[in-house]
Image: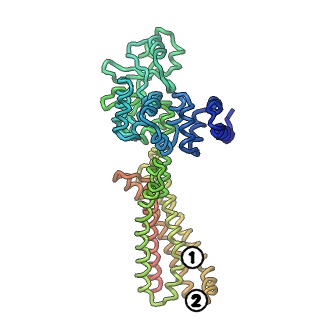
Amino acid sequence: MIPDRESFHSRLVAALEASGDDKILAEALSQARAADIAESFEVLGEQERSRILFALPPHTAAEVVIMLDEAVRGDVIDDMDTESITEIVSELTPDDAADMLGELPSEESEEILEHMPDEVADRIEELLEYDESTAGGIMTPDVVVVPASATVSDAVEQIRKATHEDELNEVFIVDANHKLVGTVPLRRLVTNPPATRLSDICDSDPVTVEASDDQETVVQIIRKYDVMEAAVVDADGRLLGRITHDDLLDVAEEEAAEDFLRMGGTDAAELESSSIATAARIRLMFLLPSMLVMLLTATVLAYSELLFTDPELFTALVLFVPMIGATGGNAGIQITTVIVRGFATGELASTKLVRALAREGRIALFMAPICGFLSWGCVRVVFPLFMKFDGATGDIQTSSQVAMAVGVAMTLAVIVAASLGIALPFSFRRLGFDPAVASGPLVTTMNDVLCVSIYMGVAKWIAL
């Protein structure tokens, strides 16, 4: 049965308000899941969080802390002393412990590691050497390893000795140099006699990733081959650890959120801190350049006014600038969204420029004249109404010129915006930048400048 989250939070708040009686709080927490407690942390104050962590068993407290959003976890850890953090880290699996320590200043991390058993500290330090966004940074070193000469009975004995917190799906077979030579799913250990050699029932071509591979690449590989986990190896093929499906879900969510935020004109870094000033600074990094680029649009309009001898015609043309700019920008965003999504999922067809041009280019060429024709028709209808509303006496020639300029410019604007929508993500990717930035406010603003320039150029040509 799925627990009622609102009901649990209400009970938890009531327990916290029960005159400081920790027995009532402990009773409320005893039946709760770590995920539900972590969710409530998001809306509780500093004192309430401290009381909850103190009332929880160390293992459950560690589960709660590692499930928190990064910004909330940072606030919680800031309120804890070194001894309390060490107690929580000691209860975590090596990969989760490395993630948590990686968020702390290096001096504090080193101090915590000094208070931990050498064997555990060494395993965590090995993980901390990898970049957090690589396969090595998200892997767990907890694996069941057996030699190629082992039997089913030997493998079962190794599993019994292992103390894994994570789900175990398969046994890894290595040679004398610890190079991975195969894997055996647990179901084969159950369905084969004890004396069966593992080399006879193993998968000799397991799915592997290198420790230096980007985590997004890891997601694509595991999705492509539809496996529960992947082995992590070094450049020489030696087994280092494994990446499980729950790690995959976390990474997929992180990558999707990162792309979504960058396409919206901010960065995932703002979620790593609860500071309002930090979030504002990151967003302004995207907004201020866009504001400055928009000055180019004003410059284009100011210069264009000098080219028109008829002030009424220029004024009429300006009325439709937002429509052309917005339509062109939206057409570009549609294409970049499709392409960036293809990059994220690793679809081969979406990562090839020629294939993207063939598909998205034809779609744009199909849409552009439709948008141009409809905008021409709309302007022919509404332009006389605008003139009547303003008390002006716009003639038929002016109405025709404006409608023609809008129609032609709209057609060209959609084509140009589509071209940018195709070219920019591939260019950003080639230069080593996140392609999602190509859908941000800065590029949308560039699209507006180009669309307005095209519009005014077309209008001048028609006026002549």
Is the residue 8 above or below the residue 350 in the image?
above
Mark 2 residue crowding within 10 angstroms, few (<14) / some (14–19) / many (20+): some
Q: State the residue in front, 201 or 383.
A: 383
Q: Which marked residue is nearer to the observer: mark 1 or mark 2?
A: 2
Q: Is residue 150 left or right of residue 25?
A: left
Quarter of the image where the C terminus is located? bottom left
Q: Is residue 386 above or below residue 110?
A: below
Question: Please, what secondary structure does the residue beneath circle 2 have?
Answer: loop
Disc 1 secondary structure class: helix
Q: Is residue 412 left or right of residue 39?
A: left
Residue shown at 67%/39% (left/top)?
A: 14
Label 1 neighbour load within 10 Å: few <14, some 14-19, many 20+? many
Of residues 172 and 335, the one drawn nearer to the viewer in this rendering: 172
- The structure residue drawn at horizontal position 54% and vertical position 76%, both measured from the top left corner, is 320
Residue 376, label in figure: 1
Place of residue 4 in the rendered image (x, y in percent of width and height, measured from the top left): 68, 38
Residue underneath mark 2: 394
Residue 134 figure quarter: top left
Q: Position of residue 350 (x, y in %)?
A: 46, 49
Dot 1 or dot 2, earlier in sequence: 1
> Callout 2, which amino acid?
Gly
Q: Position of residue 138 (x, y in %)?
A: 42, 35
The answer for how far apart the CA atoms under marks 1 and 2 are is 17 Å
User: Is residue 342 visible to the viewer in this orientation of the structure?
Assistant: no
Q: Are marks 1 and 2 in contact (CB under 8 Å)?
A: no
